[in-house]
Image (cartoon, helix red, strand yellow):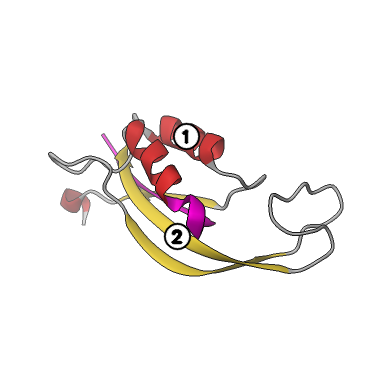
Amino acid sequence: MSTYKIVVTVPENEADKLREAIGNVGGGKVGNYSHCSFSVKGTGRFLPVDGANPAIGQVGQLEEVAEEQIEITCDSESVKAVLVAIREAHSYEEPAIDVYELAELSDV
């Protein structure tokens, strides 16, 4: 079974809610621990264009938001559920989500 790393950014005030949603569907399970994650704070920048329905900001105006980047790992069986949970719990119309398949140590 493959292991994946999922990375998502979210406004700082929504980070706890998102971590809980991810952990509740099996994301962030490491050995005998659940809800494991790593976070880094930074600034997200975006420009909503025509057709966008931004949760924060206005169409045509560059926006900056204090965000947290959350990283979790999960097995291949949990990836879809984690992605669904992220999209359901996230306020952004288009959340920035990266998914990486991790190399197995025996493959390196």
Q: Toward the viewer: 106 or 48?
A: 48
Q: Which residue lies furthest to the front in this view?
A: 13
Q: Toward the viewer: 47 or 100?
A: 47
Q: In which quarter of the image is residue 59?
A: bottom right
Please give the residue where the numbered disc 2 appears in the rendered image.
Answer: 69
Spot occupied by residue 67 in the image (x, y as percentages of width and height): 52, 62
Badge number at residue 85: 1
Earlier in the chain: of badge 2 and badge 1, it is 2
Q: How far apart are marks 2 and 1 (CA)?
A: 16 Å
**Looking at the image, can residue 82 be seen?**
yes
Q: Quadrant of residue 90?
A: top right
Spot occupied by residue 58 in the image (x, y as percentages of width and height): 80, 58
Q: Which residue is drawn at 54% across and 57% down?
A: 11
Would you say the magenta stretch is mainly helix, strand or loop?
strand
Give the number of marks: 2
Q: Which residue is drawn at 18% across and 52% down?
A: 105
Q: Residue furthest left?
A: 32
In the rendered view, does 106 fall on the left or right side of 84? Answer: left
* Residue type of the residue flagged with mark 1: Ala
Relative vertical location of residue 107 with respect to residue 77 in this rendering, above or below: below
**14 magenta-colored:** yes
Q: In which quarter of the image is residue 62?
A: bottom right
**101 magenta-colored:** no
Relative vertical location of residue 23 with respect to residue 6 in this rendering, above or below: above
* Residue type of the residue flagged with mark 2: Gln
Q: Residue at x 28, y 43 (%)?
A: 35
Answer whether labels 2 and 1 touch (C-beta < 8 Å).
Answer: no
Q: Give the range drawn in magenta.
A: 1-15
Q: In which quarter of the image is the C terminus?
A: bottom left
